[in-house]
């Protein structure tokens, strides 16, 4: 047997540490929270994506009375990037959980898988992922591989 260990590097930043561009992305995501349609979970999530061409795309979670018909904020934003054939460079996620004010909105597995598609198959360029915790710290990952190691390949 061989024992292997996987290390994941990520940074924790304060809002003051953000570059102007990342700060703008965070502000766009925060602004987008108001469009979240989440009457069932009361969990608002928004995502802003800066693309290689410098455009910003936003999305927020959209729920449905038939639960699985809704979609997460990250995929709403990512698919609108894909629909314009843009290349995602940085993705900023913010959330407001009315039921648990200490939780952090890490992206779900399905959203990580869609991020991996863009990074590893469509653009072949790392996507930086930043998350704002509810106490306003930022977790920053340099690549989707850090959130989804051992990704599925055909
Ligand atoms: N949600 C997201 O928008 N992104 C995630 O990565 C996880 C969950 C949404 C889906 C649903 O509207 C609510 O959060 C509660 O699960």
Image (tube, rainbow, N blue to C red):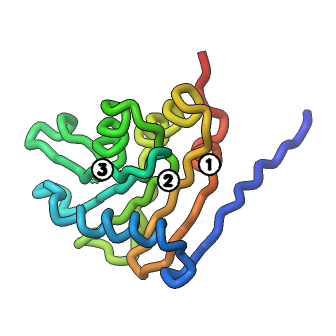
The spot of residue 52 in percent (x, y) is 49, 45
In this rendering, the answer to whether 124 lies above or below 92 is above
Q: Which residue is mark 3?
A: 73
Q: Secondary structure at mark 3?
A: helix
**Residue found at the very far right of the displayed protein:** 1
Q: Which residue is mark 1?
A: 143
- Quarter that holds the C terminus: top right
The spot of residue 49 in percent (x, y) is 40, 52
Q: Real-space Cα distance between discs 1 and 3?
A: 19 Å
The spot of residue 76 in percent (x, y) is 28, 42
With 49 as the anchor, is 119 left or right in this view? right
The residue sitting at 91% across, 33% down in the picture is 1
Does the residue tagged 3 have its C-beta within 8 Å of any atom of ligand 1?
Answer: yes
**Residue found at the very far top of the displayed protein:** 154
Numbered badge on residue 34: none
**Residue found at the very far bottom of the displayed protein:** 16
The residue sitting at 37% across, 33% down in the picture is 82
Q: Which residue is mark 2?
A: 90
Nearest-to-viewer mark from 2 and 1: 2
Q: Earlier in the sequence, mark 2 or mark 3?
A: 3
Q: Real-space Cα distance between discs 2 and 3?
A: 15 Å
The residue sitting at 44% across, 51% down in the picture is 54
The residue sitting at 62% across, 48% down in the picture is 143
């Amino acid at each position: 047997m061989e024992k292997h260990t996987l290390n994941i590097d990520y940074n924790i930043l304060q809002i003051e540490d953000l570059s102007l561009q990342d700060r703008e992305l965070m502000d766009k995501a925060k602004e987008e929270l108001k469009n979240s349609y989440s009457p069932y979970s009361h969990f608002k999530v928004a995502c802003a994506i800066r693309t290689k061409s410098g455009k910003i795309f936003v999305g927020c979670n959209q729920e449905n009375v038939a639960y699985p018909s809704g979609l997460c904020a990250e995929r709403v934003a990512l698919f609108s990037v894909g629909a314009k054939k843009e290349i995602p460079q940085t993705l900023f996620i913010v959330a407001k959980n009315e039921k648990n004010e200490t939780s952090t909105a890490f992206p779900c597995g399905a959203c990580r898988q869609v991020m991996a598609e863009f990074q590893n198959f469509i653009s072949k360029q790392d996507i930086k992922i930043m998350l704002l915790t509810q106490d306003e710290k930022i977790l920053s990952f340099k690549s989707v591989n850090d959130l989804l190691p051992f990704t599925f390949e055909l």
